[in-house]
Image (cartoon, rainbow, N blue to C red):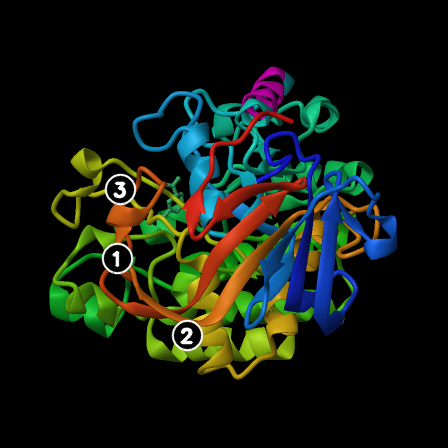
Amino acid sequence: MNGNRDGSGWWKITDVRVIDPYRQQEWLGDVIVGQGHFQDGVATVGETERVEIVAGRGLWLVPRLLDMHVHFRAPGQEWKEDLASGAAAAAHGGFSAVVTMPNTDPVVDSPSLVSWQIAESRRIGLVDVLPAGAVTKTSQGHELAELWKMEQAGAVAFSDDGRPVADGGLMRSALSYSATLSRPIVQHAEDLTLSGQGVMHEGAVSGRLGLAGVPGAAEAVVAWRDVQLAALTGGRLHIAHVSTPGALEAIQWAKAHDLSVTAEVTPHHLFFTDERVAELAFSPATKVNPPLRPESYRQALLQAMKSGLIDVIASDHAPHHADEKDLPYNHAPFGISGLETAVAAVITVGLGELAMSPLALFERMTAAPHRILGLAYRGLTPGEWADFALIDPDARWTVDPGTWYSQGKHTPWRGMELRGQVVAAMHRGRWTVREGEVLPCAAH
Ligand code: DOR
Ligand code: ZN
């Protein structure tokens, strides 16, 4: 592998199907990468360069997948996931970049912590880590954090994720700032007084299982309040992990009024229902917030994917250590690991049940999150960084968290067969994954 460590090598990926949502193009042909960037043809390859041929026949090449909602646990809870294991899991999942939520310990609510996460991740070098800073100091919901200073340090969004910004006045201020900063406020829409002690969706299944439930209304009421505040302020609101028809209606209302409101869904909410809690016999691998919802809700999410109401698919990768997670259902923390199943789960449900095109599916994991975060990337344009994943769309594989790079091993997909496998990935002209394995990588 000439030049892999410093990104100076040349590669030609032949006969590959390029799916480039940044340019809204899909085509079959050769892709040339050299000196870290996409190149426009063999003519640019110098006579002395050695070009390695990579057989791309039967594979998809998707530029710069971005997961805009992940939880790495550094600083402070590295036993769940540190920046190196999180980055390796992201690369293994095919991603070139991730947005990390700030609910660490301490909470990322200051420019120095934003800078620290970026610097450490650059040292690791597998993917770009784009931190979200907290909306309120220590995410306690009482006082706004230093949004502008965090943005200057490199924060690409603001969120108190894990909990909502409950105070309407503070949310109004945060949305006002978001308009001037051109970065979104990512809201975890949940009325905590309604979710109470709930551990799964409130409905027939929770009744049958005897578990306390979270009603769909807990999400919908906050979504409706926030779209009203987006209208009041002109701010940029992004609603995370939407799981209810009520929230979808709020988003539809906002879009009909041309507001800067966008929405995200997770692969697990597209895939599973609350029946999964019973099927897996109360396994904490089904405990996630927002909870898995009933089939009618899932159908509404699928419909919203098709209609374009949902802008983004993001994993909400939320790893926990087995010692904390493997507890009785009522006591286990919320959160499942999703980075290493996201692409395959999206291909499986997207090409199967949803019957959507790969271009439309990957748009929601590439160009759309970049646009929402105010980031520029030009897809397969000569001179642009060579960031991409090579995916075998026909490969079938069985989910085994034992093969993962994430330290968090809880997944509702365990033992299931999925379609579509990331076989290789490149970041800034260096291979980060080959033959499905993550390669060690120098800093950039
Ligand atoms: O399931 C979840 N886990 N939902 C959240 O909102 C937070 C996350 C976590 O940090 O573990
Ligand atoms: Zn959340």
Q: CA distance from mark 2 to mark 1?
A: 17 Å
Q: Residue at x 45, y 47 (%)?
A: 92
User: At which x and y percent is residue 257?
Assistant: 77, 67
Amino acid type, callout 3: Pro
The answer to which of marks 1 and 3 sits earlier in the sequence is: 1
Q: Which mark is residue 286?
A: 1
Q: For residue 306, what is the image quadrant?
A: bottom right
Asked whether residue 117 is drawn in magenta, I would say yes
Q: CA distance from mark 1 to mark 3?
A: 11 Å
Amino acid type, callout 1: Thr
Dot 3, crowdedness within 10 Å: few (<14), some or many (≥20)? Answer: many
The answer to which of marks 3 and 2 sits earlier in the sequence is: 2
User: At which x and y percent is residue 127?
Assistant: 57, 38
Dot 1, crowdedness within 10 Å: few (<14), some or many (≥20)? Answer: many
Q: Which mark is residue 297?
A: 2
Q: Which mark is residue 333?
A: 3
Helix, strand or loop at mark 2: helix
Helix, strand or loop at mark 3: loop
- In this rendering, does residue 187 appear at all? no
Q: Which residues are magenta?
A: 112-120
Residue in the foreground of this view, choosing between 345 and 423: 423
Q: Residue at x 20, y 38 (%)?
A: 322
- In this rendering, does residue 183 appear at all? yes
The answer to which of marks 2 and 1 sits earlier in the sequence is: 1
Q: Name the outermost residue toward the top.
A: 112
Q: Name the outermost residue toward the right.
A: 43
Helix, strand or loop at mark 1: helix
Q: Residue at x 29, y 54 (%)?
A: 411
Q: Is mark 3 within 8 Å of ligand 1?
A: yes
Q: Residue at x 44, y 52 (%)?
A: 435
Residue in the foreground of this view, choosing between 3 and 418: 3
